[in-house]
Image: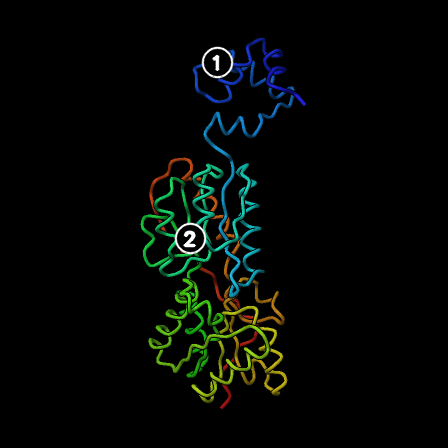
């Protein structure tokens, strides 16, 4: 493996000159700089990561904060991780994954200059990490939108717009009673931003459309789905349409409806708001697919811009089209 000494010898310069060419800390003549770069290319020299960091004050590492809380769907989290790491690799960046809920990890990686910037997921409406992040000397992008971003940039799915779209679709078919099977109660209890925004968007859209609606938190297992469905029927008898924003609950829900002899969409219309496409779910379902790859890619690109000196704070909400896969129909009767 070539060393800086080999590069210096091949270029006919000192090792300090090679170092200055790499760091840009001193002006080097174009001819000398060209000889050094040619020697680097010919020898396949790669500067040591630690030396690069010292020279450029950069680590070429970004931190991804993805707390693995009990109420999150790990499969969805891993889709975000894959998107972020793939995009980061295209920018010659590595990713340090932080999965704990505590603020200590944020402070540690920032104080130790372990990362050039931070991507933070699973943002709560009044997320205590926002205040911590505004005090850190590291560019930050939130994947999620708190009530007060405090000058931090955010990117997320347009959950309010998605809820409006599904209500419009179902009401146009003639449904006047629509239920929303939501995230587990713990997600709402801790005021997870996505859970609150989609709930509020659904209830507002239902009022605007003049339809009866109920929002019901739902645990993903068979027992949790049964309790949620019983609560829906008690609160909204004769409900004929379900909006499901709980991907993990779908297998149990579909199995339960089949056990009851109810057909989809003959007896019950179903629309999902999910990270997986409708044809990747337990059965093809009419759905709005959260564009996870695009959100992850956008988050990395926004962070790279801020690491590069971009100061403007912004919030980007990405939308999706409703894909009709035949799981909704006009209500019977």
Q: Residue at x 51, y 85 (%)?
A: 230
**Label 2 SS:** strand
- Classed neighbour count for the residue bearing mark 1: other residues with Cα under 10 Å, few (<14), some (14–19), many (≥20): few
Q: Which residue is mark 2?
A: 155
Q: Which of the two marks, 2 or 1, is nearer to us in this view? A: 2
Q: Is residue 123 above or below residue 176?
A: above
- Farthest right residue in view: 1
Where residue 217 sits: x, y (%)? 46, 74
Q: Which residue is mark 1?
A: 30
Nearest the viewer among 114 and 16 is 114
Classify residue 215 as left or right of residue 147. right
Q: Quadrant of the N terminus?
A: top right
State the image quarter where residue 302 is shown: top left
Where residue 224 sits: x, y (%)? 54, 77
- Farthest bottom residue in view: 333
- Farthest top residue in view: 12
Q: Residue at x 43, y 15 (%)?
A: 27
Q: Is residue 139 above or below residue 220?
A: above
Where residue 6 sits: x, y (%)? 63, 15
Q: Residue at x 34, y 53 (%)?
A: 149
Nearest the viewer among 117 and 254 is 117
Q: Residue at x 55, y 50 (%)?
A: 83
Where residue 19 sits: x, y (%)? 52, 18
Q: CA distance from mark 2 to mark 1?
A: 42 Å
**Label 1 SS:** helix
Decide which of tag 2 and tag 1 comes sooner along the chain.
1
Label pair 2/1, CB-CB below 8 angstroms: no
- Classed neighbour count for the residue bearing mark 2: other residues with Cα under 10 Å, few (<14), some (14–19), many (≥20): many
Nearest the viewer among 206 and 152 is 152
State the image quarter where residue 319 is shown: bottom left
Classify residue 123 as left or right of residue 280. left
Nearest the viewer among 121 and 91 is 121
């Amino acid at each position: 493996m070539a060393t800086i000494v080999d590069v210096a010898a091949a270029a006919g310069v000192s090792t300090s000159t090679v170092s200055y060419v790499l760091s840009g800390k001193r002006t080097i003549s174009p001819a000398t700089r060209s000889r050094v770069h040619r020697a680097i290319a010919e020898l396949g020299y790669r500067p040591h990561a630690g030396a690069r960091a010292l020279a450029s004050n950069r680590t070429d590492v970004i931190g991804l904060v993805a707390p693995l809380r009990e109420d999150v769907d790990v499969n969805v989290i891993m889709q975000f991780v894959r998107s972020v790491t793939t995009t980061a690799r295209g920018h010659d960046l590595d990713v340090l994954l932080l999965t704990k809920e505590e603020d200590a990890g944020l402070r540690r990686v920032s104080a130790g200059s372990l990362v050039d910037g931070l991507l933070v997921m699973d943002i709560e409406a009044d997320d205590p990490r926002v205040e911590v992040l505004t005090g850190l000397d590291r560019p930050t992008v939130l994947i999620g939108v708190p009530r007060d971003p405090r000058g931090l940039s955010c990117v997320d799915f347009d959950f309010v717009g998605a809820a409006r779209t599904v209500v419009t679709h179902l009401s146009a078919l003639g449904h006047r009673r629509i239920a929303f099977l939501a995230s587990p109660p713990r997600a709402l209890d801790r005021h997870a931003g996505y859970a609150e925004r989609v709930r509020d968007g659904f209830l507002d859209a239902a009022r605007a459309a003049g339809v009866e609606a109920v929002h019901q938190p739902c645990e993903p297992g068979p027992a949790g789905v049964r309790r949620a469905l019983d609560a829906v029927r008690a609160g909204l008898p004769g409900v004929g349409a379900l909006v499901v924003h709980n991907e993990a609950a779908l297998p149990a829900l579909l199995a339960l409806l089949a056990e009851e002899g109810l057909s989809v969409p003959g007896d019950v219309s179903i629309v999902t708001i999910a990270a997986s496409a409708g044809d990747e779910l337990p059965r093809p379902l009419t759905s709005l697919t959260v564009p996870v790859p695009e959100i992850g890619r956008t988050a990395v690109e926004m962070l790279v811009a801020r690491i590069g000196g971009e100061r403007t704070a912004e919030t980007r909400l990405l939308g999706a089209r409703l894909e009709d896969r035949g799981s909704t129909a006009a209500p019977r009767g």
